[in-house]
Amino acid sequence: MSDTDSVERTLDLAWELLEAQPTHPKIPELALRVLAAQPERSSASMVLAYHRESCGDPDEARRLYLGITARRDSQFIWAARSLRRLAFAEHDHAEALRWAHTVLAETHEDWDDWMKLGSAQALSGEHEDGWRRLDEAVALCARTTPGALPKALGRRAEYLMESLAPPERFIAAAEEAIRVDAADSWIAMMLGWSYLVQYRFEDAEQLGLRLLREDPTDDLAQSLVGAAREMLRIVDKAQGQDISLDDIRGTGTIELAWRQLRDQKLGIDLASALAALDAVLPDGLRAALRPGVSVGDLAEGEKVGSMVAEDMVTWHDGQRPGSGALWGLDEPFRLMSAAEIIAMDAAIDADQAGHPEWPENELWEQVMTDDDGAYLVAVAFGALVKRRPGVPDEPVAESMADWIWDRVAGFGGRDPRPAPPKIKEPPAGAELG
């Protein structure tokens, strides 16, 4: 066997082993043997890069992929797609968008490349352009590779969800995906919860029952059916008590549950945010936070709110008074403890007339205070507001999770949330009417 044949055989073995067992320690040995004989062999570098990525070493994989792209040879497109994949995995939306454009500068034929561009655009804040691109990618798939259409429809629904598309937009895509591939349980589950947000309780119940027939142990499907039936019961009861759907909708309870489930699926929920914050807390702030408390250890009859307050005191049961400035914000709000929340709730209940800013018939949970009469409060739909006596509530963040993610980013951590919509600047010389 010639030296060339030996190199080819070694490279073939490396690819075969990579496909069968991508973390196998023999793979780098084979790839390096090829590179020792032919240093310019980009396909061997790709094997090595794929292996390092599979082993959980994205930094080394990225270094190798970048080296391959610098050669501009036949492996360029695959290395660029790999760099795009790494950027998506690390929630680096701007970098994912850059590599998505790079890939499409080389080839325009693959519907999945267009789908990835649409996803990157939406995640980067170009929502409408990105979502339109997802639709175009589905159309391209239908024309060129109709056999892959179920996959394309599922991807579109998934990417819409990941970019926080509104429920009505996701529902249309998810229903089309489910009609073509009813076995996609993840999309079906999110579709069911989307039905709840649109107050289509019977549709949600029927979809949940179908999922339970497929897997009777599915906790989320059981919760979906339970929630749908509870809402049907409430609506039926409300009709005789002069309570409208608008009254129910005003509490934001269903919308909040939908967003919490969605954010949990995407890893941007409050629990994920608190875990990320733990990794980047400044030492001074960490020292000012008290250890968490189990709500099960509270005295009988004592409770804190279940929207966000319970999660916050479980994470850290308050913060040393006067240490709010350690968060690095203009106003020195600090975390409240379970005992402080419980005592304040009791005082409000005992003198409702003396606390008009804390209405009895509305949802609210105080979580932070500046120790001078102002509070950060979670209200209906999960929004976080600043509340002071005699002053209308001031919006602070869309949710407690968003407030925490802002702190993570401020302390130098990675923020995985999709970018907010970009506001397009009017053309030069245009006047706003």
Image (cartoon, grey):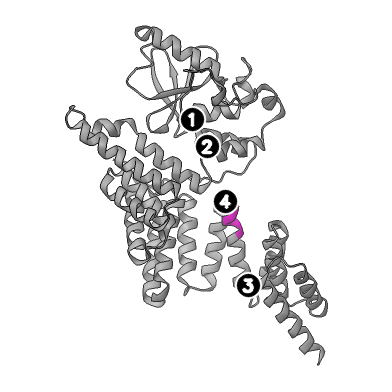
- Crowd rating for badge 2 (residues with CA inside 10 Å; few <14, some 14–19, many 20+): many
Whether residues under marks 1 and 2 lie with C-beta atoms below 8 angstroms apart, the answer is yes
Element carrying mark 4: loop
Disc 1 to disc 2, how far (Cα)?
Answer: 8 Å
Do residues under tags 1 and 4 come within 8 Å of each other at their CB atoms?
no
Q: Earlier in the sequence, mark 4 or mark 2?
A: 4
Mark toward the start of the polypeptide (4 vs 3): 3
Q: Earlier in the sequence, mark 1 or mark 3?
A: 3
| Whole-number angstrom distance, CA of label 1 to CA of label 3 | 47 Å
Residue range highlighted in magenta? 86-92
**Identity of the amino acid at label 1?**
Val
- Where is residue 421? Give x, y as percent: 43, 46
* Residue found 72% across the figure and 79% down from its top: 13
Disc 2: which residue: 270
**Where residue 308 is drawn, which disc sits there?**
1
Q: Which residue is mark 3?
A: 76
Q: Is residue 88 magenta?
A: yes
Residue at position x 36%, y 10% in the image? 352
Mark yes or no: residue 318 visible.
yes
Separation of marks 3 and 2 at Cα, in angstroms: 39 Å
Q: Residue at x 33, y 30 (%)?
A: 251
Q: Amino acid at mark 3?
A: Phe
Gap between marks 4 and 3, in whole Å?
Answer: 23 Å
- Crowd band around label 3 with a 10 angstrom C-alpha radius: few (<14), some (14–19), many (20+): many
